[in-house]
Amino acid sequence: MPARDLLIEQSLPVNLDAERFVLGGIMTDEAAFLAVGGKINEDDFSLEKHKIIFRRMSDLHDRSERIDRVTLANELMKHGELQSVDGLSYLVTLDDGLPQLYSLDSYITIVKEKALLRRIITVSQGLINRCISGTEDPTQIIGAAEEALIGLGDFQSKSSLANPAQIIDEFDGGINAFLDTSKRIKGISTGFLKLDEMTGGLREGELVILAARPAMGKTAFALNIAQHVATNPKNAKAVAVFSLEMSKESLLTRMLCAAARVDQQKFRAGYLNQDERTRLQESATDMYHAPLFIDDTAGVNLMDVHAKLRRLQAEHDLGLVILDYLQLMQGPKRENRVQEISGLSRGLKLMSKDLRVPFLVLSQLSRAPETRQGDHRPMLSDLRESGSIEQDADMVMFIFREEVYRPDKESLKGIAEILMAKQRNGPTGKVKLAFLNKFTKFENLALDASDEDGPFE
């Protein structure tokens, strides 16, 4: 073993007393295993004999048998492991020095923290060795680093179970505030009234997938939401937009034209009248100081996004993250693209939870809706390279404009449907919106008094 590896192995963070006291606490009171078993596993122990002891304690518990020195020693003997844990004499010493009033939760926390530090060191050393060997492409090593660090974040984010009393006591304001709906955290408004009514807004920690076939307007819809959040006079919040397809100048131009209701084609051609120029100037003035941040770096990866959002969140009240779009993002190297996309969706979900910010992630659909006979509305199975996208997402929305498939029908022009195909905490259904094609802008559609379906179907 190289000297560097040996040095790291010899100095790994451990707290043997905490490990021993966790095991000793179970020996003293077998009911304590219920508290320990839900928070810790055998891999959290540093010594192999501690791992073996905990594993056999788990076996006894699973069979609803008593856990004490005698039964544990017998269980170890059955598996030929008693000598490997230094015999009965070591089992007797597990509770040596254990205070009469001990804090099992504190010992568990210490063991978990040391285990996490060892995992970080192990992952880092593995990456260092791969870099030194120089046999792999750097992008492959970066992909492995992303995957490993995301896994560590997932490990760290696993929290203990909480009973109703703990949840209410930890809620800011106690039980009265918990039951007061006016004081509960509300989601970020999208600016689309019926959609907000259906979803309650975009909530912190949620991964929202917005998918559509090309030319349906998914980028326009996302930008409309971004503009509303960043310029909302009642509660403006910072918005980060990662565009892997369009330049930041093009995105800003689209938002300005949409806000000013100016035909983008006329703007690009330079044929604007004075009224249109004035409206554009007013829109630019309104947007100038808006907390809207656009990144058009090509091939951005999870580590890039996380680092940039961390810095942005430290300086601004970050309310929404938009990524356009998922299939263009670089993911950890896997055997196939489906697995890469699955890794990306999982990473983005963990990132949204860590930052406590909603992520609106755009995604492509397969060609299935176009080949489907009759109804071309997309379904969850149409998500391109879906993998775990549907599983990780808290919401999945589709944009559908039937006028694309039936351009001859006048009554369909300018009508768009937002199809809520999945929502963990609310209903599914559809919301109708107006789509102004020449402005690439979605707007609330006035509800006809004769519409018996209500605000959404």
Image (spheres, rainbow, N blue to C red):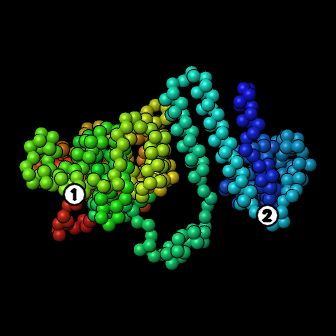
Can you identify the residue that label 1 sits on?
Answer: 443
Q: Residue at x 62, y 37 (%)?
A: 123
> Counting other residues with Cα less than 10 Å from the Cα at mark 1, is it few (<14), some (14-19), or many (20 or more)?
some
Q: Is residue 418 left or right of residue 116?
A: left
The answer to whether the residue labelled 1 contacts the one labelled 2, judged by CB atoms less than 8 Å apart, is: no
Q: Residue at x 15, y 40 (%)?
A: 268
Residue 378: x and y, percent? 30, 46
Q: Residue at x 69, y 46 (%)?
A: 115
Mark yes or no: residue 175 visible: yes
Can you identify the residue that label 2 sits on?
Answer: 102
* Element at label 2: loop
Q: Give the mark nearest the N terminus, 1 or 2.
A: 2
Quadrant that contains the C terminus: bottom left
Front residue of this view, candidates 325 and 320: 320
Marks 1 and 2 sit apart, C-alpha to C-alpha, by 61 Å
* Element at label 1: strand
Quadrant that contains the N terminus: top right
Q: Find the residue positioned furthest to the right.
A: 89
Task: Name the amino acid, label 2.
Answer: Tyr
In the displayed structure, would residue 195 be above or below residue 252?
A: below
Front residue of this view, candidates 147 and 35: 147
Residue 79: x and y, percent? 82, 42
Q: Residue at x 79, y 63 (%)?
A: 102
Mark yes or no: residue 60 visible: no
Q: Find the residue positioned furthest to the bottom.
A: 176
Q: Is residue 354 left or right of residue 35?
A: left
Task: Name the amino acid, label 1.
Answer: Glu
Toward which corner of the image does residue 2 lie, by quadrant? top right
Toward which corner of the image does residue 305 lie, by quadrant? top left
Q: Is residue 9 left or right of residue 262?
A: right
